[in-house]
Amino acid sequence: GADATMDLITTTLSEAQTRRGDVDGLRSEVGAAEQATRGRQAEIKEELAAITPVLDAAKAAVGQIKADHLNEIRSLKMPPEPIADVLGAVLRLLGIADVSWSSMKKFLGNRGVKDEILNFDAKRITPELRKDVAKILKTKAASFDQATIARASTAAAPLAAWVKANIRYSVVLDKIAPLEQALSAEEAAARHCA
């Protein structure tokens, strides 16, 4: 009787010690994972901090576009290729599938065209849309070159910069989303271990 009870107590204490060791081990693993995620998140936040002023500057430049310059583009019978490429990318980002010249002219004629561009939220860019527009940026790189587009149109140059900045910003946002989810999960796991 007494020996069996003593053995049971010893075994129970030993198991409790093992479980405590397991919990401590799990806690330190969760802590290390959370630390690593926070490190990656800090790097990406630095990227975000670097691209945000670029996006803000691009928006400011779009805000400076004069109506006369937009009308100048609209008055063209057919736009030069760089203007068509840039406007096509702008329309796609804004969710306008029709990138024909008549659609571009109609878009440029909208009263709130600059506001629509300025109020655009890069969080609306889906991975498919980003891939689609990034492909345009890559295959039509010359059209988005600042010197080339500035020669083609005073109004299209800031739009080209705006498209590039939004795509870069979207890439960074896409990187940060899974890290924020991982961090939330790791914080929940840490609370669970506590």
Image: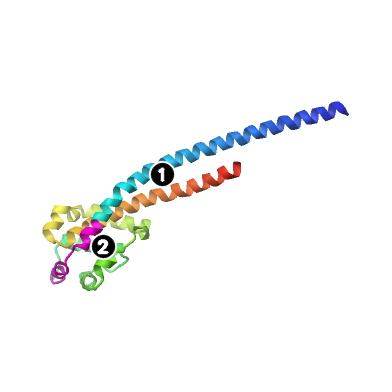
- Residue 122 image label: none
Please give the name of the residue rendered at 17% of the width and 58% of the height, measured from the top-left corner: 157
In x, y percent, where is residue 52? 30, 51
Q: In which quadrant will I find the C terminus?
A: top right
Query: Is 171 placed left or right of 73 in the picture?
Result: right
- Disc 1: which residue: 41
Is residue 99 visible in the rendered structure shown here? no
Above or below, 97 relative to 136: below
- Residue 61 magenta-drawn? yes
Any mark on residue 90, and which? 2
Specify the principal SS of the magenta part: helix
Q: Earlier in the sequence, mark 2 or mark 1?
A: 1
Give the extent of the magenta segment. Answer: 58-75
- Describe the element under mark 2 as helix, strand or loop: helix
Q: Quadrant of residue 193?
A: top right
Q: Residue at the location (21% across, 55% down)?
A: 140
Instruction: From the viewer's side, name the closer residue of 48 and 150.
Output: 48
Side (left or right) of 175 relative to 87 = right
Question: Does residue 77 sit above or below 31 in this rendering?
Answer: below
Q: Where residue 129 sits in the image (x, y, percent)?
A: 34, 59
Instruction: Indicate the position of residue 102 as horizontal and vertical percent values.
Output: 21, 72
Q: Which amino acid is tagged 2?
A: Val
Q: Amino acid at mark 1?
A: Gln
Q: Residue furthest right?
A: 1
Rendered residue at 21%/73% (across/down):
109
